[in-house]
Image (tube, coloured by chain):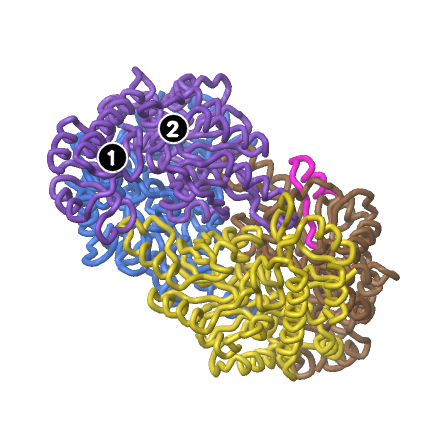
Chain colours: A purple, B yellow, C brown, D blue
Amino acid sequence: MIYFDSDYMVGAHPEVLERLVETNGLHTVGYGRDEFTAEAKRVVLDACGIADGEVYFLEGGTQTNAVVIDRLLDHNDGVVAVDTAHINVHEAGAIESTGHKIITLPNRDGKLDAKALDSYIDGFYRDETNHYMVRPGMVYISYPTELGTVYSRQELADIGDVCRRWNIPLYVDGARLAYGLCADGAEVGLKDLAGMCDVFYIGGTKCGALFGEAVVTRHRDLLPRFVSLIKLHGATLAKGRLLGVQFTALFSNGLYERIGAHAVRLAMKLKAGFTEKGYRLYIDSPTNQQFFVLPNEKIDELKKVASFELWGPRGETETPVRFVTDWATTDADVDTLTAAL
Amino acid sequence: MIYFDSDYMVGAHPEVLERLVETNGLHTVGYGRDEFTAEAKRVVLDACGIADGEVYFLEGGTQTNAVVIDRLLDHNDGVVAVDTAHINVHEAGAIESTGHKIITLPNRDGKLDAKALDSYIDGFYRDETNHYMVRPGMVYISYPTELGTVYSRQELADIGDVCRRWNIPLYVDGARLAYGLCADGAEVGLKDLAGMCDVFYIGGTKCGALFGEAVVTRHRDLLPRFVSLIKLHGATLAKGRLLGVQFTALFSNGLYERIGAHAVRLAMKLKAGFTEKGYRLYIDSPTNQQFFVLPNEKIDELKKVASFELWGPRGETETPVRFVTDWATTDADVDTLTAAL
Amino acid sequence: MIYFDSDYMVGAHPEVLERLVETNGLHTVGYGRDEFTAEAKRVVLDACGIADGEVYFLEGGTQTNAVVIDRLLDHNDGVVAVDTAHINVHEAGAIESTGHKIITLPNRDGKLDAKALDSYIDGFYRDETNHYMVRPGMVYISYPTELGTVYSRQELADIGDVCRRWNIPLYVDGARLAYGLCADGAEVGLKDLAGMCDVFYIGGTKCGALFGEAVVTRHRDLLPRFVSLIKLHGATLAKGRLLGVQFTALFSNGLYERIGAHAVRLAMKLKAGFTEKGYRLYIDSPTNQQFFVLPNEKIDELKKVASFELWGPRGETETPVRFVTDWATTDADVDTLTAAL
Amino acid sequence: MIYFDSDYMVGAHPEVLERLVETNGLHTVGYGRDEFTAEAKRVVLDACGIADGEVYFLEGGTQTNAVVIDRLLDHNDGVVAVDTAHINVHEAGAIESTGHKIITLPNRDGKLDAKALDSYIDGFYRDETNHYMVRPGMVYISYPTELGTVYSRQELADIGDVCRRWNIPLYVDGARLAYGLCADGAEVGLKDLAGMCDVFYIGGTKCGALFGEAVVTRHRDLLPRFVSLIKLHGATLAKGRLLGVQFTALFSNGLYERIGAHAVRLAMKLKAGFTEKGYRLYIDSPTNQQFFVLPNEKIDELKKVASFELWGPRGETETPVRFVTDWATTDADVDTLTAAL
């Protein structure tokens, strides 16, 4: 069996694991107040080109989104996102459980449109009854998106402009950031991203770590008392240095980019394999997630050799499916898959 | 100035006020454990044709929706409603503040479509990842809808069937129930409604009371420990008998229906006045709310003689507007308005 | 039967009711944006000696406490209160339902001790692990307290000093404020109170209104976007002017003080009647609530002529009980009660 | 420097780490639906002597407490715990953030007293106003307690009896369960515990794992839809098998007990070292946490050779302190420490 279900199906990249093993027996204080964590913060800020910002390490993506959004919003604020956003679909209501509405706008290839965003907020403020409506208090996008697509530099800049116009923060979910930064034709580097949004997180779990996400902001005061809020959400790791150790590894020797580039290269190869055989793209993704619409019989057949996910409920005759690559995917895996088409 | 902003712009109907004045000096125990409240419960259940159910009195609509929905949903459940639903637009995020998502489906003239509902829930259960999605845990509709429209008997029955198929409760927001029951061409009576949904509330605030809503259910055990939950939501009235006194008045001598019929008659007259003058309906409503699309200059002109609301943000050249009638609206009010068109 | 259960057992004081009746047929805009409400705000601020503050009207006490506290606290803050506080005992968990801990300190005759408060907060800040503890974010007291007692001017000033020292707001629950201001030997007037705390509410429900509480603050910006938060909590009255009308009445012609003085005079008479007959005070209250410890047989006997509450669970041989007076209590009521002792 | 701050200052026990390394490169499905997790559930249930129950793996203790308690309580229920409970003091308000009150009773050496518990609940139900009070909906204890003490078999049985009498679940926080099971003089084994409470968790983080806790219940239906609730709380690990792998290691070859026994032996040695030198116990703990009251000068002196925590704010002349042992503590560490006394 070869695995394309997602990018969290193996353990850590060997270079990450090695550092965990090397440091396993050392004593440090807990809860991220140790030197490994401090070092990782420096390394991450440096990679982001931020001279004076903050980094916080959390364990997983849903948790990270909930804590950040809970911090950025006032009581009756909502977070604006596209309808396909991970927070809107696949986090079991985690955002709403913190008391906040997700205000959804239609996606365009998984992306938020700056004009539609501006128009929505403008309409809100021109509505006489808006004090009884949920105020758009921040914007959530992911990079890459839930559908594997990436924003162009201009698209990102436009969204940032709208946010500044209305004085609300822009937050970027980077669960799969490595693959976005290394996307086929990507225009946005890590430092670009860090400068264009207010808060973002660098995904570790899906990008080579055992687990872990790094929340980054260039505004020192944007997330007040965040350490306490992380604890309140049950998102504080007792052996916090495990996160620091992993992120230092990911941002040493270009590992994070190597992971991204490897997975994207194989994803492009996989896409070519499918399209050459005449299969239809569900969406054209330049990153490590590839979506096709396959006949149900073909799905059943492929399931014998490969593990992968249906994208939504099974259709009557055909169904969208997703194939995902990561650091552990090999050329041989892709070859085997496409040979089975 | 004549007033068409909404149906909460005057005090109570004189027959309701009279009862409040008559009983003002009497002593009763508090918090709705008094005889007036007990009497009102009997009167309401009788009007609903329910032999063995429960009635709870609350103070206002947003509060009522929040308490009922909070009670009916399990932790990661959401409430299914149309995008135009009051809970989704004009309650400042009250439902989300209890931790629950509003799952929105597109409205059709303000109404929920039974087939679209069934299809959504079916898709949810056929999605392999649904344990990380928000489960559709109940259905919310309003009668009449936010746009003044009413469901036919068949439409309501179909929604009820879908709910039973998926074993989730159907809740009806009856903030303006009097006008729905007396709608032009209405097919659904109070007893029909009571039998076709699991919980509903009979609006008092917008239908002749000073304030107050009556939550009704024919399932004794559907709202366990509801008295405590009402208190937790800060929705318990110390002088609870005030609600009982008002609802007994509303359901004595056919008052509730008289109020509904009066307002609807004047709304139909108002609609005729506008359409005869060539103005366009925003939607064709058979109840006490009437919606037109008016040129902005006409709006500015009318605002000199009448008070009414824009329905959404002001457009560039024309804007939807709403005119609402109630027990205190007179034929002369409508005549004055239509004369000014 | 004569009634001493509480101060919410009759309707409104006749002078309040009269204004409601007089204004019943008038049209105003809803949700408290009307002239009656504006007038009431002016009248209340004037009575409080506040030149530039804010007033908000809500419907009931539990609701008011929840909304104010939810607004004043940051995410992992708690509210400091005595163990006997209404919010800690008799509000069904309303405060916790907004996500906040009530940090309790032992009461002294129902009162919070400034030194104990200071010591607690000091200890918190000296604890190395306090970033994982609930931060004391505000102080809640009631005036009079849950046990009917009142703070001296010095006691209040001391608590205010502690709050300023630690830079947290002091909030006073004035559900029964009329009786506190008119307490036997009271040192604190309305203007004193308004100047000594940051936010407080003036109780209407238990002090002569049908229902309603007025939140007052002398800091214009302390409760940002409070109108939206009130709505989110379901605490917005559609016919908002009903609150304005009532509070204008309560603060016209000295009515609020007349109500307080009347009830306190009768409470003192009642206390004298009990103590003369040799019954033991549970606590010595100078306000309209009187607490005694009575033998269970005496309780059973008295219940035949008077309605009143046990204060906590029934003891084996004797039980604390409470008798409450209000504007509607008469000398004859008290005479009948004491004659039955 | 030698480390006694806590039991989360090194990585995983070598036998645990080894299994993580061995399995690192294998592919499995995510989110705990893999074979490693399934195996761990079987191993854990077997160790607990539960034929037909459920096991769920989470990442950390605060999170686990919040999710379990949120699941077990109805809306206006509270959880009964001692005042010193971890959930009440050191979880930053995580429980309250889910909307629930912690009802505290005074601790006796960190323990809950069955009689006090029964008396509290009995008083609650005998209070006429209890429908407006927070209902005691479950009981939380920890084993060992926050102060390192353990319940006798009889004490545990008595608490269980009270819970059954009032029909509420008993939940045991086993963050340091290994040390409780191996406590000096312990009477309660893992199977005993599993049979005497309704839900408990077996601590991994503080007992030899990198991180992770195993929630165990012998009632299949007590935690409905728990997988979704875990996700909603952001507590789902994408690479869920990491938890399975670790717990299988912990419960293979008697590792969990070996870890507990080792740490407790050294803790007893450490206690003897302190008491022989005449230092006063803060409390007499039979587990891996040892508490002493030390003069401040001695604390300052010891801090030069050893890392450990103050237990609460620093006193004027002396302060309680805590020393904790774990699998990585050596005889030499303890010898060095006691030599420095």
Nearer to the camera, A286 or C238: A286
Element marked by disc 2: strand
Image quadrant in which the N terminus of chain A is located: top left
Q: Nearer the viewer, mark 1 or mark 2?
A: 1
Q: How far, Cα to Cα, is label 1 from label 2?
A: 18 Å
Label 1 marks a residue whose chain is A
Q: Which residues are magenta?
A: C155-173
- D83 horizontally vs B303: left or right: left
Q: Quadrant of residue C197?
A: top right
Residue hosting label 2: A202
Q: Quadrant of residue D113?
A: bottom left
x, y percentage for residue C203? 72, 59
Residue hosting label 1: A324
The kind of secondary structure the magenta stretch mainly shows is helix
Say above or below: A249 vs D156. above
Evaluate whether residue B146 shows in this view.
yes
Q: How many marks?
A: 2
